[in-house]
Amino acid sequence: MRFDGQTVIITGAGAGLGRAYAHMYGHLGANVVVNDLNEQGGKKVVDEVVKAGGKAVAAICSAEDGEKIVQVALEIFGGVHVLVANAGILRDKSLQTMTAEEWDIVLAVHLR
């Protein structure tokens, strides 16, 4: 299976599973849009994918900023074919001890 000429957006791709997906799709010939809030992590993954022979660009913003992410894909690669909705955040707390603000942030990333 190859993804030559296809563009893949991966949210939360600056580390962990998102990073692994970026490497996999880059290896399979895709144009990879690495989305992450963390600029250092996102750009590092882009550099790794390119160094391994793939094509990648960073979209440094929240996964909630979908229009920005898609705009990067359109401007750089001309389209979008695959979305890997990988972004997620955890709070090391039970629901009972989480503040309303912490809960809102979790919902924003996971549901919106």
Image (tube, rainbow, N blue to C red):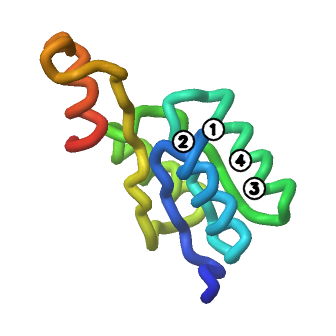
Q: Are discs 3 and 4 less than 8 Å apart at CB?
A: yes
Q: Are discs 2 and 1 less than 8 Å apart at CB?
A: yes
CA gap, disc 2 and disc 4? 10 Å
Q: Earlier in the sequence, mark 3 or mark 2?
A: 3
User: According to the image, label 3 marks what residue?
Assistant: 49
User: According to the image, label 1 marks what residue?
Assistant: 42
- Mark 1 Cα within 10 Å, few/some/many (few <14, many 20+)? many
User: According to the image, label 2 marks what residue?
Assistant: 59
CA gap, disc 3 and disc 1? 11 Å
Q: Are discs 1 and 4 less than 8 Å apart at CB?
A: yes
Residue depth check, mark 2 versus mark 1: number of the one nearer the observer: 1
In the image, 72 versus 102, the foreground residue is 102
* Residue name at image x 62 percent, y 68 percent: 25
Q: Quadrant of residue 55?
A: bottom right
Residue depth check, mark 3 versus mark 2: number of the one nearer the observer: 3
- Mark 4 Cα within 10 Å, few/some/many (few <14, many 20+)? many
CA gap, disc 2 and disc 1? 8 Å
* Residue name at image x 38 percent, y 54 percent: 85
Asked whether, in this view, residue 86 is left or right of residue 31, the answer is left
Q: Quadrant of residue 65?
A: top left
User: According to the image, label 4 marks what residue?
Assistant: 46
